[in-house]
Amino acid sequence: MKVVVGNNEQISKLIAEEFIKVINVKPNCVLGLATGTSPLQVYAELAKANKEGRVTFKDVATFNLDEYIGLEGTHNQSYRYFMNENLFNHIDINKDRTHVLKGTGDYLAYANQYDKLIADFGGIDIQILGIGSDGHIAFNEPGTPFNSLTHVAELAESTIVDNSRLFNDISEVPTKAVTMGLQSIMNARKIVLIATGKNKAKAIYNLLKGPKTEEVPCSILQDHKDCTIYCDEDAYSLVK
């Protein structure tokens, strides 16, 4: 596991270049994507590179990590909406090749076939992750089995509180989500994780220095053969 420390602009550009490298080597590659504030600058850099002609997404396929249960894809806090607004609408991607878990309708049936669908596309070539203050990745909360595949997750109170900043009121935050499991994530050939801010410092310390335990979901990444952790100084502050 490698670690790169820099400010948000620096690490976002480095992650974007990792994605561009993968795409240019394999134009029909499969990208694993995340939502939240952490990857926003990465996506802005990718859109810029696409506009400048340094990369094309025409043959790329994407799979997102998760989605809130109860939100339609048109809801402004759904992850389908997030991806359209922050990346897909700004690049030359075929949206039929973009996959986001469903939060309504037959969401359970779609979740049950998600891992097979990823495999049918050849598997994820590069996966971007954020990290929760309690060490969760995607919506895999503490206690999630390391061998978990895509499933329905009950959100921890700390996750609901963390995400409430994006809603008008904490009562609007969904309490369940559909998420790729920890094994689903580990199946990616390459993983990059981005963490910024003091509130991520304990999680990054536990990831880099703590034992591998299901109580710290991100600790499973210690076993991945090609994983790079990108942190700002605040998130890395407890490791020094």
Image (spheres, rainbow, N blue to C red):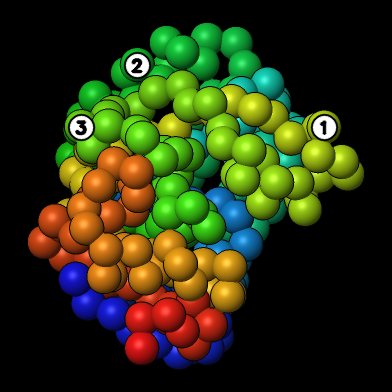
The part of the image, by quadrant, that contains residue 63 is: top left
- Nearer to us in this view, 94 or 157: 157
Task: Tell me the kind of residue under disc 1.
Answer: Ser
Q: Which residue appears at 43% of the width and 63% of the height?
A: 203
Q: Is residue 98 visible?
A: no
The residue identified by callout 2 is: 112
From the image, tell me which residue sits under label 3: 147
Amino acid at dot 2: Asn
User: Which quadrant of the figure contains the C terminus?
Assistant: bottom left
Pick the residue in front: 57 or 70.
Answer: 70
Q: Earlier in the sequence, mark 3 or mark 2?
A: 2
Q: Residues within 10 Å of mark 2 (few under 14, many from 20)?
A: some
Please tell me in which quadrant of the rendered image residue 61 appears.
Answer: top left
Counting residues from the N terminus, which is met first, the one under dot 1 or under dot 3?
Answer: 3
**Chain-order first, disc 2 or disc 1:** 2
Identify the residue position indicated by label 1 in the image. Answer: 171
How many numbered markers are drawn?
Answer: 3
Crowdedness near tag 3: few (<14), some (14–19) or many (≥20) residues, C-alpha within 10 Å: few
Residue 159 in the image, given as x and y percentages of width and height: 60, 44
Residue at 59% in and 25% down? 176
Mark 1 secondary-structure assignment: helix
- 207 or 173, which is in the foreground? 207
Residue 68 in the image: above or below residue 34? above
| Vertical position of residue 104 compared to residue 73: above or below | above
Q: Which is closer to the viewer, label 2 or label 1?
A: 1
Q: Are marks 2 and 1 in contact (CB under 8 Å)?
A: no
Q: Secondary structure at mark 3?
A: loop
Q: Is residue 214 left or right of residue 70?
A: left
Give the residue type at disc 3.
Answer: Asn
Mark 1 Cα within 10 Å, few/some/many (few <14, many 20+)?
A: few
**Which residue is located at x 24 percent, y 24 percent?**
116
Q: Is residue 105 visible?
A: yes
